[in-house]
Amino acid sequence: MTNTFIEGLVENDINKLLAAPKSDLHNHSTKGCRLEWLAERIGVEFPKPPQHLGGLDGMQDYFRSRIKPYCDGFDGALIRWEGAFAEARRNNIKRFTMNFGIAEVDMLGGIEAFEKTIEGFHMQYCPDTVFEAELTYPSCCDATLEADRLSQYASSGYFKAIDICAGENVQPFEAFLPLYRRAEDFHLTKKMHVGETGSASDVKRAVEVLGLSEVHHGIGASTSLEVMRFLADNKIQVNVCPSSNVMLGFAKDYASHPIRILVENGVKVTINTDDLLIFNSSVENEYLLLYQAGALSAQQLDDIRLAGLG
Ligand SMILES: [Zn+2]
């Protein structure tokens, strides 16, 4: 069955793709705006980002040296958050999840001020969008310490999910148990960055040990039929970020991106931006890149789009 979104893919019509309702469920908020939007907002001309960034370290170096100096500190973060919601409006993002570190909540003066600021942008730009804030911790964190102070951030109910990011296999999955157990007290959806660089068995172990219901990245699962069956049977959602994987060198290219294998093995996937400000590919473009590379059909991509809205 054809619709505006499928037509947009087939006809390479960006406006049709932008108009269709979509989701973005893996988005690091301070890197969630478009480079073009930021350039206009602060009056700086940025060079085009490189095609390949060389892993997570290369990405951080690029961000710290080429972008952050122009939008640093408290004011810079506010502008970038605003830009993330402006992009949600431009791209008709109807389900939107962004993650925030506790340092970002603290920077705004605590959860009350944080919620007021973020909800202000949400209401200003895309009040009809279902927005969920996710609390993310670096994989080097002291999970026992963070569990003890989780209530400071989670008891207001504004945060709906918990996540671990910034590198895999830094600590065993069991090390995060105190934090994930505590997260259950606040009914947070349990997620984690795993299977970006890690293996299929890492993905399965993380889900089993921590009781995850969603996995950020998860492409490593594509090397194991058993793990994909496990994810499909347990309805674990995998929030994939194609350009991030290609630009960081964790996937060879769009044509051979592992999302195809995940989809063909019944895993529920969504398509997301990760760090739009760095990878410079907004949601509609992620779908288009996969379509044009022949990784997935227009119908498969439309099914993914609709699943992300559910
Ligand atoms: Zn991420």
Image: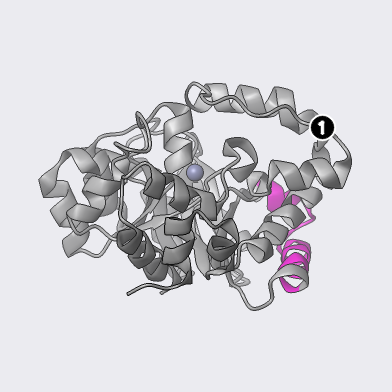
Q: Is residue 245 magenta?
A: no
Assign the N terminus to one quadrant of the image: bottom left
Tell me if residue 176 can be seen. Answer: no
Q: Identify which residue, 112 or 133, lies in the foreground.
A: 133
Color style of the picture: one colour
The residue lying toward the viewer, choosing from 133 and 69, is 69
Residue at the left extreme of this rendering: 226
Q: Residues within 10 Å of mark 1 (few under 14, many from 20)?
A: few
Residue type at the position of mark 1:
Glu
At which x and y percent is residue 308?
Answer: 42, 66
Q: Position of residue 256 (x, y in %)?
A: 29, 36
- In the image, taking residue 120 as reference, residue 194 lies left or right, namely left
- Residue pictured at 22% horizontal, 42% vertical: 222
The C terminus: image quadrant:
bottom left
Q: Is residue 120 magenta?
A: yes
Residue 287: percent from the left, percent from the top? 44, 53
Q: Residue at point 33% right, 38% down?
A: 255
Magenta stretch secondary structure, dominant = helix
- Mark 1 lies on a secondary structure that is loop
Q: Residue at x 15, y 41 (%)?
A: 224
Q: Which contiguous range is marked in magenta?
A: 103-123
